[in-house]
Image (cartoon, rainbow, N blue to C red):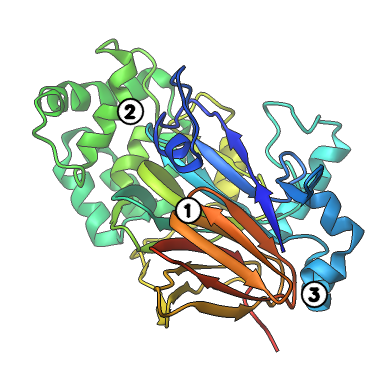
Amino acid sequence: MYKLTGKVQHYAWGGTGYIPALLGIDNITQQPYAEYWMGAHNSNPSIVQWNENKGIALNELIKEDTNGWLGEKVAGQFGTLPYLFKVLDVKDMLSIQVHPSKAEAEKGFARENEAGIPLDAPHRNYKDDNHKPEVMLALSEFWLLHGFKEKKLLLQTLQQTEAFKILLPVFEKEGYYGLYKQVMELPQATVNGMLEPLLYKSEPLYKSNQLSKSDPAYWACKAAAPYAGNYTGIDRGIFSIYFFNIVQLHPGQAIFQGAGVPHAYLEGQNVELMSNSDNVLRGGLTPKHIDVPELLKHTLFEGIVPQIINGEERGPERIYHCPVPDFEISKIMPGKQTPFTHTAFSAEILLVAEGEADIANPVQTLQLKKGESVIAGAGENYTISTKTRAVLYKAGVPEVE
């Protein structure tokens, strides 16, 4: 059991205050702090405080004793830490994205390797051979797009939005796939012609704060704000804002996103746990590479009802179960008289999000303050206690027989 230091990602969409406040950093230059990574991803592994004088990358540490850290079952199944743990501060909207299945990721990664596409090439789709299901747990009020609306709701949107009435016959005849393919392949001039009147109509309401965040027009206007009324290259991702479910999560609520479910984070802070992968197929709201044929091949074209996860309470722990063997996330709130005692099934990463906590095993006690994290190996028995108040988030692998 050792203290662990993660890595910050300074993506442009990140906020400037939340993650610095969590980590105790003075962000004098107001640099964006978008994500804080805790894990063994080869591109940005966390550093484990091995002793007072030495830090070691987590991926290297696990490689040296894979069975010891992960346990034999997890080591045999995955070979490395199967998850990546993050804190996100979403100030500006993220790109609309879809993640491939494991089988498709393996095929896509091999195909691009054979084609000689460099791993860091901007037009590369597959950075590794893994799938990327993910669960996010809201730390604040959080807004996101999640999957296509059910048929009845999407029909209402197409009927009631003047700009989209022309798309009604396409949806009625060719369904979700035909509708999405149509808007993703439209010439840019046609996209501008369809969306410009919609934005002009909504913009005064947006600027006067008369639009609710549950209204797609709010997010369409926010996405178009950089154009400042000069709508010559409108992002076609705005169609998706109207076609997808807009979901609001309250703090403590979570949502799982599996392979093929189109989604986009819109605003707020969360902790996110995903498979150890960086495979993203983008569908808009981004200047980055969009491969429409590949996107269409992997998107789940059906209406869904978002399933919000409230977690299962077990004493001081609330567990958010996910339908994958790669990861499981929980929130731990030990009381002064109710410590949390646990044996790790596989390697677990714990982050103190609020307050201070002591994490003790039979041979040592680590004192952690807000923003600090620790890794515990397979079979580690530990107890979390607090003299005041503490909120921790734990990333791990679900236990199997």
| Discs 1, 3 touching: Cβ within 8 Å | no
Describe residue 296's horizontal placement relative to residue 101 as left or right. Answer: left
Q: Which of the marked residues, 2 or 1, is nearer the chain's N terminus? A: 2
Q: Residue furthest bottom?
A: 401
Describe residue 225's horizontal placement relative to residue 283 as left or right. Answer: left
Describe residue 244's horizontal placement relative to residue 285 as left or right. Answer: left
Disc 1 designates what residue? 271
The location of residue 44, given as percent across then percent down, is 71, 40
Judging from the image, what secondary structure is the residue with disc 3 in? loop
| Discs 2, 3 touching: Cβ within 8 Å | no
Q: Which of the marked residues, 1 or 3, is nearer the chain's N terminus? A: 3
Q: Nearer the viewer, mark 2 or mark 3?
A: 3
Q: Amino acid at mark 3?
A: Gly
Disc 2 designates what residue? 223
* Looking at the image, residue 378 lies above or below residue 149: below
Q: Amino acid at mark 1?
A: Val
Judging from the image, what secondary structure is the residue with disc 1 in? strand
Q: Nearer the viewer, mark 2 or mark 1?
A: 1
| Discs 2, 1 touching: Cβ within 8 Å | no
Q: Residues within 10 Å of mark 1 (few under 14, many from 20)?
A: many
Q: Nearer the viewer, residue 369 or 252?
A: 369
Q: Residue at x 84, y 76 (%)?
A: 72
* Looking at the image, residue 17 lies above or below residue 257: above
Q: Amino acid at mark 2?
A: Ala
Q: Nearer the viewer, residue 80 or 216?
A: 80
Q: Residue furthest right?
A: 64
Q: Residue at x 56, y 36 (%)?
A: 292
The numbered disc on residue 71 is: 3
Q: Which of the marked residues, 2 or 3, is nearer the chain's N terminus? A: 3
The location of residue 188, given as percent across then percent down, is 42, 20
Q: Residue furthest top?
A: 230
Q: Residue at x 50, y 32 (%)?
A: 25
